[in-house]
Image (tube, grey):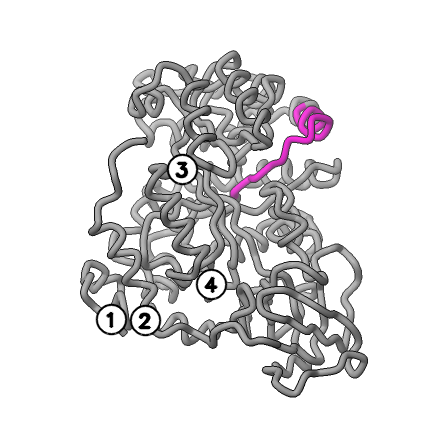
Amino acid sequence: MGKSIPLSFLFLFAAASFSSVGGQTPNAVLVIEGGTLIDGTGQPPATGTTILIEGNRIREIGKQGEITTPANAHIIDASGKFIIPGLIDAHVHYRYPWIHRLYLANGVTTVRDMGSQVERVLTLRQELAVGNILGPRMFVSGIAINPGSVKAMGVSTPRELAQKLVEAGVDGIKVTGYTPAELEEVVEVAHAHGLLVYGHTGPKVDGRAPGALLAIEAGLDGIEHGYGVLEDSMGEAVKVPSDFDPAIRDHLFRYWYGRMHRNFDSDKAEALIQSMVQRNVYFAPTLVNIARHERTPEDLAANPALRYIPEGEPNTLASFGEEERREWMNTLVRMKEFTRRFDRSGGLLIAGTDSPNGATLPGWSLHQELELFVQAGISPMKAIQTATLNNARILHQDKELGTVEIGKYADLVILNANPLEDIRHTRNIHRVIKNGRVLDPEVLLEQNIRQFGERGEQQFDRTRRE
């Protein structure tokens, strides 16, 4: 399917894997003692816990002193610290080798790629799975289905492309442009193989997509991006300039999506929310993707995380002037309102960031998304669940990931402070445990600088080893 993967690409990704890692290889037995466990199930925190990990699985959880510690165990003293499940970012675009450690250093132990060349991303998924590359677990969508991708892949219909993606071994199917009838066909293929269909529901303005309500009726399982739901929450269409061209991305975001707050209709929003809840449609608002528009170039330059990001990567930040940023912030207020109401109506809210697009920096942006959820009125406990249990559910991995429970994979984050008191404490990471391997965030970031340099100045040096 498609062209073979260039050896230069594989070498570039593999180069990130042969350097020393930010922690030991998985111990036969790892014991975490004395921490407060926030297990992700929604149960109250459990103080003074002991977690025993054997290989890459959680084998025992109990009160400190009640579990026998084997003589050969590696012990982490977590007294005064807080333990949460490994974080999952369910909307990333995994294009670059410099992002592997950045996700892990931020406690993101699993990601879902939302649109990449099929052979490339499937190969990368395998490299990560077998440990050739130190990075997060990966679930993939392959190329997103739209008229352009159908043509590019040499097939005649979205149904045919969906079938090819299924045969290739993707974990779900993303759509970004379709008619309701075409979406029904994609859903039929995907559901027959136990896969979800998710993606954009707009823009409606140029007929490239049907909008949220029609997409839901056609069987869409999940809506990505908050501006998709706002389109179907407007009382009337946004007034646009006479020279408006929806094919121009800047026009679309400046004059259409950015101004949707002006015509927000609460009753229409409620009707859409109820339809989503009744049909079990999840919602990934990617608020951080929207909130970036309030930042100025000066804000960006002051972000310490930028030292790990190659020059030119956050290239869509601050493309708007002060007036447009005010419009976007008003639209963000409505997106937060919709998100809060969706959650309180019993909808399945998940966390995704669209990173590393624009200013949504890989790893850091997931913590920003959780903070935006809390600002919207969602409790810190439920915010954590959006990036753990809820994301595991939409990946069909809730028996393996998403909570700290006996038998599950040993993906955990040890925090220095209580995230239930302040959600920003999810950023205060002591150690990350991914698949039973203990990782030090500071070491991971130092290694990233050694390999790729400040602002990615060495990112194309494929012969470099550490």
319 displayed left or right of 181: left
Circle 3: is it few (<14), some (14-19), or many (20+) Cα within 10 Å? many
Residues marked 1 and 2 touching at CB (< 8 Å): yes
Mark 1 or mark 3, which is nearer the start of the sequence? 3
Q: Amino acid type of disc 1?
A: Arg
Circle 4: is it few (<14), some (14-19), or many (20+) Cα within 10 Å? many
281 within the magenta span: yes
Q: Magenta residues?
A: 272-286
Q: What residue is drawn where x is 41% and y is 54%?
A: 361
Q: Secondary structure at mark 2?
A: loop
Residue 115's label in the rendered image is 3
Where does the image place residue 418, in percent across and percent down from the top left?
67, 70
Mark 2 lies on residue = 19
46 displayed left or right of 32: right
Q: Secondary structure at mark 3?
A: loop
Q: Say which of 331 and 368 sits in front.
A: 368
Mark 3 or mark 2, which is nearer the start of the sequence? 2
